[in-house]
Amino acid sequence: MKRIAIDMDEVVADAIGRFADWYKRDYGIEFTAEQLKFRRFESLIDTAHESFIKDAVYHDDFFKGLDVIPGSKEVIGELYKKYEIFFTTAAMEFPNSLLPKLAWLGEHFPYISWTNIVFCGDKSIINADYLIDDNVKHFKRFIGQGILFTASHNHDVEWDVRVNNWQEISEMLL
């Protein structure tokens, strides 16, 4: 059975939405869906608030209750019938994210065993046929096929296999 490794943030979990919600809460500034889709979040915020992102991701509640990226639950449910699925997240940079991410995955993807959840730093250690991720740096030494999931921060990044949503993943792998 072939294996698919799937990143969390900006692939199945909407961290940018959380940034936007918290920025609105803290500074009263709201961004449009268009802005959030096509611009790096860092470029949207006031330079006087440059520590906002770092402060947010180190907050204990940041990774709790993130919204699910549309289509991911349905498509991963179908992929699970044909592939061995692993969630792989480079969570080691933010140690406070480990328990919230584990709980989030258990809530939204309860059929994925804890044995198929990998918290790591360097994803090249993952032995899978495909890696679906929003950051090409994880493909550099990965032995399988990297599939770039389009996110606000990677529109200008060149990669040979790119998907814009979970429907395109379904068409590619199912």
Image: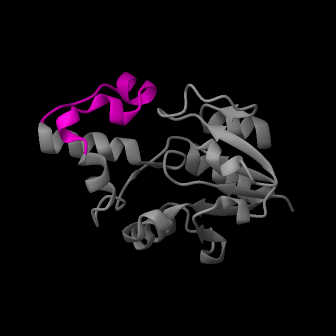
Q: Residue at x 61, y 69 (%)?
A: 118
Q: Position of residue 76 (x, y in %)?
A: 65, 52
Q: Is residue 8 visible?
A: yes
Q: Residue at x 57, y 47 (%)?
A: 72
Quarter of image, res 46: top left
Q: Nearer the viewer, residue 81 or 87?
A: 87
Q: Position of residue 64 (x, y in %)?
A: 34, 62
Q: Residue at x 54, y 33 (%)?
A: 154
Q: Report the coloring of the rendering.
A: one colour
Relative height, residue 132 to residue 160 (above, below): below
For the record, the magenta segment spans: 28-50
Relative height, residue 54 to residue 152 (above, below): below
Q: Position of residue 113 (x, y in %)?
A: 63, 74
Q: Is residue 174 visible?
A: no
Q: Residue furthest top?
A: 34
- Tell whether 38 sits left or right of 25: right
Q: Quadrant of the C terminus?
A: top right
Q: Quadrant of the N terminus?
A: bottom right
